[in-house]
Amino acid sequence: MVLVAAWTSSAATTSPAAPAGRGLIRHVVIIIQENRTIDNLFNGFPGANTVGYGKNSKGEMVRLHEVSLNAPYDLSHTHASFVAQFAQGNMDGFDHTYFACNKDAPARACPDPQTAAYGRVPQSEIEPYWDMARNYTLADDTFETNQGPSFPSHQYLISGTSTVADGAALRVAENPLTPNGETTGGGCDADPTTSVAVIDRDGSESASVYPCFERATLMHEAGAAHLTWRYYQAAAGAGLWNAPDAIRSVRDGDAFGAVVAPSAQVLDDIYEGHLANIVWVTPTAAASDHPGVTDGTGPMWVASIVDAIGESSYWNDTAIFVTWDDWGGWFDHVTPPVYNSYELGFRVPLIVISPYAKEGYVSHVQHEYGSILKFTEESFGLPSMGTTDARADDLADCFDFNGPMHGFSHIRTTYSPQYFLHQPISKEPADDDW
């Protein structure tokens, strides 16, 4: 893979210029789901750049077949899998994708290895997502910033990077593992034998470190500005999606009380008038959209949060971003721009929901995870972390802060918020992202 840019610096910079929306947005809610691409989740969405066929390594065109959201198999989405699928920019290596069927899955549910990655989810199973995109903005040119699985992706979503420390040359590239290859979760609460592979500028993953770091995060910036933040997660402790646990100064600091479990507590906090200024929401495994573990309730889970905010007093000053933490091994036809040995990855969906979001708009502007961070920094006058938030755009094309505010459009769903509030705390393994 050709390197076209150096790693970006992680040194903090001065506050960004005031955007049109500063002072209008007082709450940013980042809802993070799992493992989907635009071609997989929004195939055929009006105005979106999707295709019905994908090329394989033999030069053949493979039809994207319908795959249920809760199909009982998972595709490999390690950095090595990205490299194989990317195929030096030819985007034709998806027939080399490894996958694993659930142990209790019938043989007929396991796909053809040559076409497993060439799947699209039926619209009928994800109608709430399509309603959100139809009513507000779908950004179809949003790229996963990193070229790897969940653990580093969630670090990018709080720091704009996965470096092992501010200014470090090495970045976390994979999910943490114990010596026997188990994915028990990463973070400062991880088993002492746990390590995670790191990647250098040349693309080598020959080194590994304990998955506990010290670097700047948006949480630090918020705290310094006396803003409130919350990070909602399924359960306490180490976990692939439990990003704050992997930042030592957050994990051991007084602010760690802002890490809240279970995830559904966000609904009570909205209803009770306790929504923080900056919020991250991660799901349970069942509601995650992650292949092989989800039960298909992800669209309803997200809709319950969006509806709770939309039907509250928070609606008028909130921006909601719904995104997916990595591509999950699924086919996508758009070649990502490659900046270095680990950035950027394949496209993931991004839905922008706000009274100021453009209605029925499909953004074809290039975005990445750093774009969400940059929008947040600009909205609250926070300094840049000097990571990927510095180079990213600020999602300005998705908003109109000069026109009238839009009223909220209720998202139809078959599961009520009470369903999620009454779910028991889940410590089910999220995924292994092998």
Image: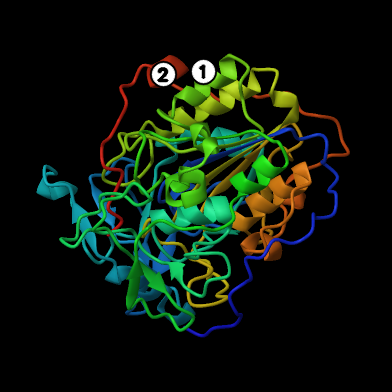
- Who's the residue at 34% across and 52% down the image? 186
**Most foreground residue, 218 or 146:** 218
User: How many badges with numbers are in the image?
Assistant: 2
**Most foreground residue, 256 or 327:** 256
* Residue 329 can be seen in this image: yes
Residue 135: image quadrant is: top right
Task: List x then y, in percent, for residue 230.
Answer: 55, 34
* Residue type highlighted by circle 2: Leu
**Most foreground residue, 406 or 124:** 406
- The residue pinned by badge 2 equals 421
* Residue 327 can be seen in this image: no
Q: Are marks 1 and 2 in contact (CB under 8 Å)?
A: yes
- The residue pinned by badge 1 equals 268
Residue 116: image quadrant is: bottom left
Q: Does 290 sit left or right of 143 as displayed?
A: left
N-terminal-most mark, 1 or 2: 1
Tell me, for residue 319, which label it has, or none. none
Task: List x then y, in percent, for residue 393.
Answer: 71, 59
Q: Does 113 sit left or right of 149 as displayed?
A: left
Quadrant for the C terminus in the image: bottom left
- Who's the residue at 64% across and 50% down the image? 372
